[in-house]
Image: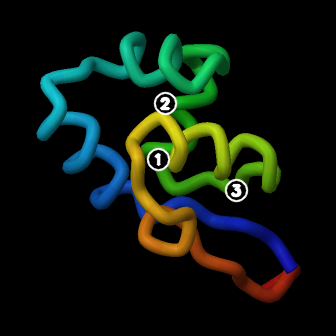
Amino acid sequence: MSITAKPLEIARRRVERGWDKSSLAREAKINHSLISRVERGNGVSAATAKAIADALETPVFELFQLSEAGG
């Protein structure tokens, strides 16, 4: 199983807060480049998914989904 971002939802919630990608990265305590990868729909670790969801005060399942590894 892998964790995949719902990029449009993450970006929408970020913009609603008036944050740019750097602001979200700072709040989530992760690297700015990781936010860019997440918003392109790339997979993430459980810890990264939780950090982003916590920063956006949103349940993880609203921002990320589980998918079968390898398709």
Q: Nearer the viewer, residue 48 or 58?
A: 58
Q: Which mark is residue 59?
A: none
Residue at 62% x, 52% y: name it: 42
Residue at 71% x, 41% y: name it: 48
Q: Residues within 10 Å of mark 3 (few under 14, many from 20)?
A: some
Q: Which mark is residue 36?
A: 2
Q: How is the image coloured?
A: rainbow
Q: Secondary structure at mark 3?
A: strand
Q: Residues within 10 Å of mark 2 (few under 14, many from 20)?
A: some
Q: Could you tell me if the residues under marks 1 and 3 are in contact, i.e. CB atoms within 8 Å?
A: no
The N terminus sits in image quarter: bottom right
Q: Secondary structure at mark 1?
A: loop
- From the top left corner, tell me how far across and down residue 17 is, in percent: 18, 32
Residue 47 placement, left or right of 20: right
Residue type at the position of mark 1: Arg
Residue type at the position of mark 3: Gly
Gap in Å between the C-alphas at discs 1 and 3?
A: 9 Å
Q: Which residue is mark 1?
A: 40
- From the top left corner, tell me how far across and down residue 4 is, in percent: 63, 65
Residue 15 placement, left or right of 60: left
Query: Up-down: is 68 above or below 12?
Result: below
- The quadrant in which residue 7 appears is bottom left
Q: Nearer the viewer, residue 61 or 32?
A: 61
Q: Secondary structure at mark 2?
A: helix
Q: Which residue is mark 3?
A: 43
